[in-house]
Amino acid sequence: MSRAGLDKDPREVAAMFDGVARRYDLTNTVLSFGQDRRWREITRRALSPKHDERVLDLAAGSGVSTEEFARSGAWCVAADFSLGMLSVGRHRGVPMVAADALRLPFQDESFDAVTISFGLRNLVDTQAGLREMLRVVRPGGRLVVCEFSTPTWQPFRTIYLNYLMRALPPIARAVSSNPDAYVYLAESIRAWPDQRALAELIAESGWTDVAWRNLTSGVVAIHRAVKPS
Ligand SMILES: C[S@@+](CC[C@H](N)C(=O)[O-])C[C@H]1O[C@@H](n2cnc3c(N)ncnc32)[C@H](O)[C@@H]1O
């Protein structure tokens, strides 16, 4: 199995990430021209974890974002269903849990905040994932989603979509351990709701005070929301 389809069969998605795990972080940095580090720092600031808080980083992959969030002193746990991705990140010193985002092995209201970076797009059911995150966060707790989105300026959007469909696959072939997975990446970004549509999905899933900000002209958007008290 080399890549998942847009139906996002969970077994195919997990196997695909197992297949890219070894060089995943390096490939991200190359394909994003080094922007990924900045996106993660800004996500941490949006999450604003306090030192006594419990934070769930969902679909955390190798835990690269979890490590960034843990710099705040908060207790941050990485959860993912790809054992390949988790084991690549085991040197990071953050707790890691093998878990399906749609059936989390945590009690209701057990976290102060939940966050998901470049993972929500991969869930087979976006709203079921958002509702499961709502379940495990305490009332008044926060959600921060960092995800690819839609560039806001039309000329740039055209260049970016060309990059995704034409330039990204050959670059991925040079650096990734499973280049076919990056065809899925390009397709899934194109099929993903834009900023406003994602905000609506988040609100429909039970979250309030939904807001977003664009990074890199909308290549990435950070959505924030709060669980009603
Ligand atoms: C693009 S990677 C992002 C990893 C990491 N958050 C980052 O920012 O680098 C997407 C991750 O979502 C995970 N994932 C997808 N569906 C999942 C699910 N239902 N439950 C848990 N993890 C899932 C994959 O295994 C993969 O590690």
Image: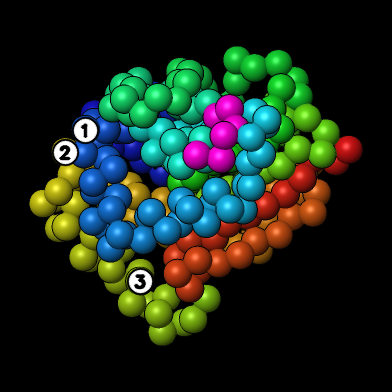
Residue 213 tag number: none
Q: Quadrant of ligand 1?
A: top left
Q: Is residue 92 magenta?
A: no
Give the alpha-carbon distance from disc 2 to disc 3, as whole Å: 24 Å
Whole-percent x, y for residue 87 in the image = 31, 22
Which residue is depicted at the point 60% across and 33% down?
74
- Circle 3: residue type: Tyr
Circle 2 residue: 177
Q: Nearer the viewer, residue 76 or 102?
A: 76
| Mark sitting earlier along the chain (2/1) | 1
The residue to which callout 1 is attached is 22
Q: Indicate the position of residue 148 as horizontal and vertical percent values.
A: 46, 57
Dot 2 amino acid type:
Ser
The residue at the point 41 percent across, 51 percent down is 188
Quadrant assignment for the N terminus: top left
Judged from this view, the residue extending furthest toward the right is 229
Q: Which residues are magenta?
A: 71-76
Camera-nearest label, 2 or 1? 1
The answer as to whether callout 3 falls within 8 Å of ligand 1 is: no
Q: Which residue is mark 3?
A: 160
Q: Main secondary structure of the magenta part?
A: loop
Residue 176 position in % (x across, y down): 18, 44
